[in-house]
Image (cartoon, rainbow, N blue to C red):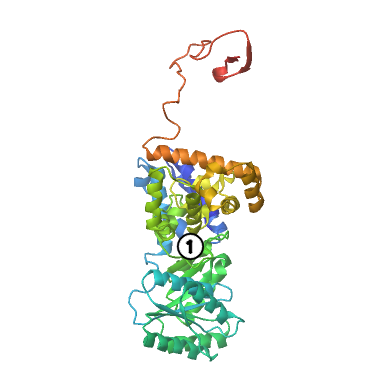
Amino acid sequence: MFESLSTRIQGVFKTLRGEVRLTPEHIEAALREIRLALLEADVNFKVVKAFIDRVRDRATDQAVLRSLTPGQQVIKLVRDELLALFGDTEGGLTKDAPTPRVVLLLGLQGSGKTTTSGKLAKWLVRQGRRPLMVSTDVRRPAAIEQLSVLGRKADIRIHAPETMNPVVRASGAVAEAKAMGFDTVIVDTAGRLHTDDDLMGELQAITHAVQPSDLLFVADAMTGQDAIKSAGEFHRRVGVTGVVLTKLDGDARGGAALSVVSVVGVPIAFVGSGEQLEDLELFHADRIVSRMLGMGDMLSLIEKAEQAIDKDEAANLEEKLRKNEFTLDDFRSQLKALRRMGPLDGVIGMIPGLGDFRQAAENKPDEKQMSRIEAILSSMTAGERRDHSMMNGSRRHRIASGSGTSVEEVNRLLKQFTEMRRMLQMMGQGGMPGVGKGLRLPKIRQSLRPGSTPSGFRSGKKRKKRGPWGLMRTR
């Protein structure tokens, strides 16, 4: 979501790094570009003005202008001010709450409250909690059934009484949680506009009945400033304790995330970054800012890897690599683990130094290509994946036909796998790929006189084309 904003800001930083000594004119030019980038990203204009003023006041200080690395100093100031936009409050639920904790999800229609309920329940299970979910959305068709489907998928208990009274349904869920030993109740409410007095009155009645410790406003990050205005009105009417930003993996401008804390006055608790139940993360301001500035996010990457990769499977893979027994079956398992970590574009964006790789059009990760590779691997028999050397022409034709690809793509995959297997073997033995006894580097003289011939080339009259150093290659 922050790709466009991140590209613009990183471009400004590259210009600053090229300056030996910064002047107030350099600072103003950089701030002008940052201001335009923030406004184009749909950040609230009042927030942008205050942000630029704070950075200018600190960046034009003589200590910064005269420092040995003024460009780095400005980058640090921008980073600090971006962190200040998000506030210093940690994401997640409130620290102290009675048992059972009641979490109320509220917001506009279509913002993703029901899906977020399932994601939050899954996140609580990973924290060792026992959640219970209930839907009070009795107006939207199949809303209750949708939450039941998510509950079955996540193996979470659903409170499903016969009554269609939203207040009674929420109160019954709390009573069941106390009786059955559930420590958290997630109440999914109906979507409503803050201008609908009847529905807002219903929401206030639910809040009074269950006394929630957390009121999370679920905002679609793609709706921009409209979501922020609505969050402010909900906060005024019922008191919001945190915001959940959904669809943060979309291609919208993302200014809502930078404006919500300053405009609404409540912290961001969680962010949704995908369609799966596992795609809900605690909000960490420092990690988001690091991604925006192209510095990567190794902590989030490690957490995703820990969730996606089984420890026993990793140990088994390490042993296979040591013994040079890496097979196409193992390759397919690693591709699936990588897909479980989320979109490949987002994973690469978390690795420091690979922001430019992600943004380059010719190097952009291709999710469709990964799907085609998985299709080819799935079309092979178990024996073929264990021993790729048995692949003959008829087998390759069968695999191409079964996967909807061409024989050339199958051949290319097998060739790349063989090369990767060779490289892994050399690395397991402590060597470096491409450097071995059989490699001979040409000896080149350190200095060449004009018109002289480098070592390894012989002069002669029979020549065809020009080679290195503008000389003519012999046949």
- 32 and 380: which one is in front? 380
Judged left or right of residue 194, residue 281 is left
**Neighbour tally class for label 1: few under 14, some 14-19, many 20 plus, Cα within 10 Å:** many
- 348 and 151: which one is in front? 151
Q: Which residue, as the protein is rendered here, is positioned at the far top?
A: 461
**Residue 209 x, y percent position in the rendering:** 44, 89
26 w.r.t. 127: above or below: above
State how many labels appear: 1
Judged left or right of residue 163, residue 100 is left
**Residue 208 x, y percent position in the rendering:** 44, 88
231 w.r.t. 422: above or below: below
Residue at x 56%, y 59% (from the top left corner) = 253
- 166 and 42: which one is in front? 166
**Residue 276 x, y percent position in the rendering:** 52, 66
Q: Which residue matches tag 1?
A: 258
Residue 466 shows in the view: yes
The kind of residue tagged 1 is: Leu
Toward which corner of the image does residue 186 lie, by quadrant? bottom left
The secondary structure type at the circle numbered 1 is: helix
